[in-house]
Image (cartoon, rainbow, N blue to C red):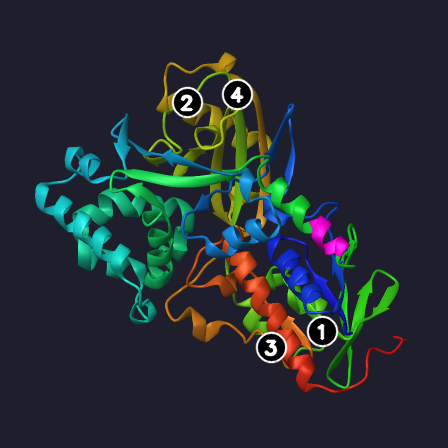
Amino acid sequence: MSSIAVIGAGPMGLSTALELLKQGHSVDLYEADSRVGGMTASFDFDGTRIERFYHFICTGDAPYLNSLRELNIEDKLHWVNTSMGYFHQSEIKEWGNPLALLKFKGLGIVAKIRYGLHVFLSMKRKNWRKLEPRDAVSWLKSWVGEETYRELWRPLFDLKFYHYTDNLSAAWIWARMRRLGTSRSSLMTEKLGYLEGGSDTWLEAMVNEIKRLGGHIHLSCRVDEILSADNTVQGVRCGDRKIPHHAAISTVPLPFVSQMIPSLPATTRRAYEAINNIAVVCVLVKLKRSFSPHFWLNVSDERISIPGLIEYSNLNPMEASIVYVPFYLPGDHPDYQREDAWFTERTRDYLRKIRPDFNAEDILTIRAGRYRYAQPICPPDFLDSLPPIETPVSRLLVADTSYYYPEDRSISESVKLGTTLAQLLTNNLERDNSPGPKPVS
């Protein structure tokens, strides 16, 4: 039995730990926060248990669906026909299906045909490798034309990716389109899923299963350093404590890795540091009444500096309407340094601009939360810039959500990569007949 440290108790870290335990290893899971879950963690929002950042399940999320089945909580999964809207030219319009495209007044008939054809062929595409060297903007323009890109795509890109907009991987954008585009009950209707109790239901089941198999979860225990000797993992240091381990897997955001593993070569550390991330300030609003009939509401309005909002209660029914309003910003953007009140006041203003009949009395509670490393930025040929998961330090693996590429962030991708990390380390250990960890001095 090998003693393995897993750093980070988000969905990827939990999945990694569970798979290692299934393979017979001894596992200690370290988490700096006081709770597991990372971006999927929940909190009490004025009497409503809700996730800090919204999540949903697509019909193609096979790794996550298999996990629900293995944890015997598949009966908590519910599928809902959801819809998308578009706030455009001061009006909420239906969006996300062929009929809505035909009715859309912002494009000519040729532009609509090109747009529809591009979506259709993108859903049929299976090989993303040919898209890997291309940037998303030129790829989209080549299919839908300058007019459609300017009208539909550019506002969303600019308010989520800012100065990174012209250097995004076409494969990455395609994968995001395909995941949602193929999660449908019909050509006209989107189909998404949610868990009773939200992601907490899955997190609790994962924690219980990890503990049942003998794993140890250490909360409020930040790993300050992964210790090594002779270029081989020896353990971890949490504050003044040095804990011996035979191997380690880090699942925390790559920007934290360089300081945590000083024994890595300088070239590897620079590669981690070169990965850019978008931050998010997500404002959560509880309303007396529904804001719109849509789960998604894209926004294209010069007065409103968000790409859209998500009415989560249109997926997961609740007593009150719950709306997420995400402000995506580069971490060094001056606005990201502003107080939460700055974002909540803008949210109030934006809600009134979209629905002038809404007023202050309709808002029951409003709160802002933020996450610095919310979204890795994936430029063309992104795979070439990612360091290998197997590091130059023996028995040390490193990955974060960047390694989902070309897929976007999701619990399903966390489960998939966590399983891969566990199997990869097990294979390494089977090739390595060295003795177990020794006390760390």
Question: Residue 22, located in which quarter of the rendered image?
Answer: bottom right
Is there any visible trace of residue 166 in the rendered image? yes
* Residue drawn at x 77%, y 51% as measured from the top left: 219
Which amino acid lies under the numbered mark 4 shown in the image of this protein? Ala
Between disc 1 and disc 2, whose residue precedes?
1
Label 1 neighbour load within 10 Å: few <14, some 14-19, many 20+: some
Between disc 3 and disc 1, whose residue precedes?
1
Which amino acid lies under the numbered mark 1 shown in the image of this protein? Pro
The residue to which callout 3 is attached is 390
Assign a secondary structure to mark 4: loop
The residue to which callout 1 is attached is 262
Marks 4 and 2: which is nearer the front? 4
Which amino acid lies under the numbered mark 2 shown in the image of this protein? Phe
Q: Nearer the viewer, residue 278 or 242?
A: 242
Label 3 neighbour load within 10 Å: few <14, some 14-19, many 20+: some
In the image, taking residue 248 as reference, residue 54 lies left or right, namely: left
Q: Nearer the viewer, residue 153 or 31?
A: 31
